[in-house]
Amino acid sequence: MSALIHIDNLSYAYPQVQPDAEPVWVLDGVDVRIQAGEFVAVMGLTGSGKTTLCLTLNGIVPHSTGGTIGGRVLIDGQNSKQASVADLAQTVGLVFQDPETQLFNMTVEAEIAFGLETLGMTRSAMVQRIDWALSLVEMSEFRHHSPFELSGGQKQRVAIAAILAMKPPVLVLDEPTANLDPLGKQEVFAVVERLRQQEGMTIVMVSHESEQIAAFAERLLVLHAGKIAFDGAPADWFKEVDTHGLATPQLSQLAQRLNEQHRTQLDFPDIATARDVLQAWEILPPRLSADNPPPNFPPQFQLKNISYAYDGTRSAVADVSLTIGRGEFVAILGQNGSGKTTLAKLLNGLLRPNNGQVILDGIDLKTQSVAELAKSVGYVFQNPDHMIFSATVREELAMGPRNIGMSDAEVAAQVAAVLTQFALLPYADQQPATLSFGLRRKVSVASVVAMQTPILILDEPTSGLDQRSSDELMAILRHRHTLGHTIILITHDMRLVADYVPRCVVMHEGHVLTDGATRMVMGQADLLTRTRLEPPQISQLAAQLGLVEPVLSVAEFCQRVRPA
C-alpha cells in the first residue's frame, strides 16, 4: 500500500544571516512513510527539528521560509516543492505551536468560520460545523468573544477548533496541548483519536506529553539532531533506560525501577493494569522522618481582597486575599481562564486591581511604577514572543540587567552566566526570532533570570520544553530558592509541581479555591477534578491502592511496596 505521506532523504537549512555562511541543517536525511489513518506522535529535544518537519508537510517550508532543501516530501502524491501552500492546505491542516500566529479574526466564531468559507460551505452547514468544533474544545460560551481577550490555553483551544472544523484528511498538530490544563490535554488527544476513528484522519502530533502519547499514539518518531533516532511503538521507546532527555510516563519509570529492585518483568501500560498487579503486593507504612515545623517566611506579598475585571464586568480575579512569604516557592494552579496570569500581572504592577490592595514589603504597589518594580520583581510572560525584540540572543539577555542599572561589567557577567546556565552559548549571536519556540522560551526565561531580581514570577515557563530542558530550568530555580529568592510559578504540569514546589495555590473562576502544602493539595482529587487538574499518575495509582498519605514521586512509591 502506498504511503499517504512519503518523506525521502529530507534535509533542510533555514536562510543564513551571512549569505556566505555554511548551511545549518535542521533536518538531515529524514526518511518517513506514514499510512492513511495512522496516529503518529513526534518527540525530540528542543531544537531537534520537530516544528520544521511539521512545516514541510504543508509547504510552508520551503515556500514561505526560503532556505536550502534536499530530498522530497510527497503528500497524497503532491510534491511539496511544486505544489503551493494553498494547494497542500486542501489536504493538510496545521495547528501551529504558538496559537497567536494562527488567530487574526475579531471573534472566535469568525476565526473558525474563516477556514470553512475557503471550503465553500453553505451558511447552515458552517453553523453546524462551528457548533461542533466549539463543543469539541469546550469553548462554546466564548463564541462571540475576541480571541485576543482569551487566556493562552483558551487561544490554543480556538486554534485547534479552527483546524478541526475543516476536517482535513491530514491533521498536523505542533505542541497543541502545551498551554492546556491536564484534563484539557486528555480531551484533545481523545478528540483527535476519535476523529481518526470516525473520519479516517491521519494524525501527526508533536508533543512532550509522554503519558498521553503512550495512551493514544500507535507510532512514535523521535528526532535527534535532525535525524530519526527511533521509529516504532511508543511502549518500546519508553522501556528504554536512556530516552535522550525526553519525558517518560511515570508508569514506565515505575515498572523499570521495580524490575530493577525485585527482578520482576512488569509492564504497566495504564493505571488499571498497575493497580491490578500491585494489589497483590505488600503495602508498607510511610518512612516518616522527624516532624519539622514549616518554615516561618516573613510576609512579602500581601493581597487584600483584590479584584480585577478587564472590561469592567468580566471578573478575572475576584476578592482574593493571599500572603506569600519572602523566600517561598509557590505554584499557582488552575484551569485555563481561572485567573492565574491576571493574578501574576497584579503582583508585578502590569495590572492594577479595581478593588483591594497589593502590598509588597509593606508598600502598596499603587505607589510604584512598573519600572521601579522591575528591580524587585522579574516576570516571564507565558508567550516568549511578547518579550523578545533584540537583534541577538546576547543583546536580549543584556537588556534587562542594563535597564535596571547594572554596570557594564555586571551586565557582561550576568549574560555570560545565563548563556552557560541555559545552554544558549551556541545561539548567542543568532537572532532570537529565528530560533525554535522552545529555544525562544529558554531565551525569555534567561533574560529575566539575568536580572537577579529577589522575586521571580514565571508563567508556564516549561510548556513546550523537553524533559531535559525543563529539569535544567527547575534546577536553576531551585538554586535561586536556596539563596532566599521568592519563586512564583504558574503551571499546568502537576508532575513538575510534585517534584519541585512545596506550596500550591489553586484558583477557580477568579477565586482561590485552596492553598496549602503540595502533598495536601495532591491528595484532594475531587477538588482538583473540579478545577480540571489531576494528580500525577503515581499519585493516582497510590490512591487507588489505598495508600492514605499522598505519594508524590516514583521513588516514594517504590519505598511503599514490595512483593508479598
Image (tube, grey):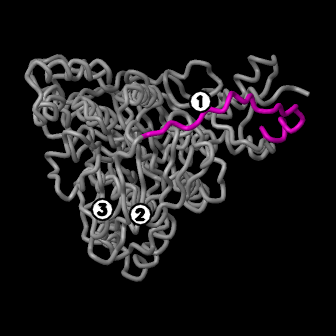
| Main secondary structure type of the part rendered in magenta | loop
Q: Does the CB distance between marks 1 and 2 fall below 8 Å? A: no
In percent of width and height, residue 429 lies at 15, 23
Q: Are marks 3 and 2 in contact (CB under 8 Å)?
A: no
The residue at which mark 1 appears reads as 232
In depth, the one of 127 and 58 nearer the eye is: 127
Identify the magenta region: 273-297
> In which quarter of the view is residue 319 placed?
bottom left
Residue type, numbered disc 2? Val
Relative to residue 305, is residue 198 drawn left or right? right
Q: Quadrant of the C terminus?
A: top right
Q: Which residue is mark 3?
A: 357
How far is the residue under mark 1 from the one under mark 3?
55 Å
Q: Residue 478: percent from the left, percent from the top?
A: 43, 28
Q: Which residue lies at the image location 54% right of the left edge and 22% below the top edge?
A: 243
Give the vertical position of 81 relative to 317 (above or below).
above
In the picture of the structure, the residue carrying the numbered disc 2 is 320
Kind of residue indicated by mark 3: Gln
- Residue 8 drawn at (x, y percent): 40, 28
At label 1, the amino acid type is Gly
Q: CA distance from mark 1 to mark 2?
A: 49 Å
